[in-house]
Image (spheres, helix red, strand yellow):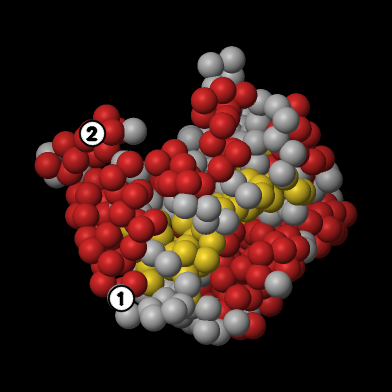
Amino acid sequence: MNIYFWILRLAALFGHHKAKLLVRGQKTSIKTIRQWAETLGDARVVWIHVASVGEFEQVRPIIERVRKNQPKRKLLLTFFSPSGYEVRKDYPLVDKVLYLPFATRRNAKKWVKYLPLEMAIFVKYEFWPAYLKRLKKQQVPTYLISAIFRSNQLFFKPWGRGYRRLLHCFNHIYVQDLASQQLLGKYKIKHATVAGDTRFDRVTEIKQQAKELPILEGFTLNAPKVIVAGSTWPVDEKYLVKYLATRPDIKLVLAPHEIHESHLHQIFQLFEGRYIRYTEATPLNIDKTRILVVDTIGLLSSIYRYGHVAYIGGGFGVSIHNTLEAAVYGMPVVFGPKWQKFREARGLLQAEAALTVRNYKEFEQALDTAFANQQKMGERANQYVQNECGATDLIYQALFH
């Protein structure tokens, strides 16, 4: 761990932007906590730690439930990643948002000493040995939620026994699925409950709060076939261009993962300029093209509602992006080959609500199949999401009642 943190410091010295933000942010966290703790009086703090934005979205329904039902409870939210902190540093439903100080023994000792903790909640994959050991030593109730375990993780390797002991630092572990609970059981880790994934509750809430987007309404009105392609990367976009070239009846709403000007210029060249940017779209010009490029952030979860089939990007790179934001609207979902780490992707495939592709030929066949079976696959997608809801209620009742 110390080597890792020194590497981050070196990266910051050499100008790496995210490393610089992280090193600078975590330095001030302990001082801030010490000052804040002096203002709390007899109040105790619920500390919630997440890695980044995705894990924040998993715990968000629980934070909202606590704030609604127990408004006086003190909540501290920490991030490890600048990608999470910089986006949510002003999140209004907690009392403090901070970077997690680097997980050294010294920092962990100070952190737990200064904070009057009621409990600590970690989300999904966060296992910082120094903090977990210190919390256990100080007898602070500590929980892991929305966790998922696979046999190829370090815990379950022949040399992973020491790391596996960390799981005994948690008073209870709330896992997403039965397979995770059974895997833990093989190693005599019995303090685990199948609670599901709070993201299903979150996407259902997002759907209910979806924004009305008149430009999307007008662009897709009376269109027989609309693809909403979310969080796309260059390889996804090349496939989409090729697919549209032989299917003039299909409209495309393209929401790329990166919307900086250099990527938007690549898209311009790829589509030969035959599209309209969302920020330049008007009721008068949206009929002049069948491709709308979303060049702003924060709208994708509302945009899916205007499509007939969703294509989720990233699967030809590191991994696919969020499939649930689309599936909750009851639409077929198509994605690339890097999906294995995501339980919800497996669930959608097993429910026959999604299709995965490895090359352009399969990409073409999958989209054609999805349009041909749109209603049936869409109903299965919606049913799968609804069946998986309920994790928020279970965890909230267990921890806060």
User: Which is more toward the observer, 146 or 251?
Assistant: 146
Residue 7, numbered label? 2
Q: Residues within 10 Å of mark 2 (few under 14, many from 20)?
A: few
Q: State the image quarter where residue 343 is shown.
A: top right
User: Which is more toward the observer, 15 or 178?
Assistant: 178
Residue 325 pos. (x, y %): 63, 60
Position of residue 309 in the picture relative to residue 32 (left or right): right
Q: Residue at the location (73% across, 68% down)?
A: 397
Q: Residue at the location (72% across, 63% down)?
A: 398
* Mark 1 secondary-structure assignment: loop
Q: Residue at the location (55% across, 84% down)?
A: 71
Q: Amino acid at mark 2?
A: Ile
Q: State the image quarter where residue 306 is shown.
A: bottom right
Residue 327 pos. (x, y %): 71, 57
Relative to 51, is 300 above or below? Answer: below
Q: Residue at the location (53% across, 53% down)?
A: 139
Relative to 58, is 193 above or below? Answer: above
Q: Amino acid at mark 1?
A: Glu
Q: Which residue is mark 1?
A: 38
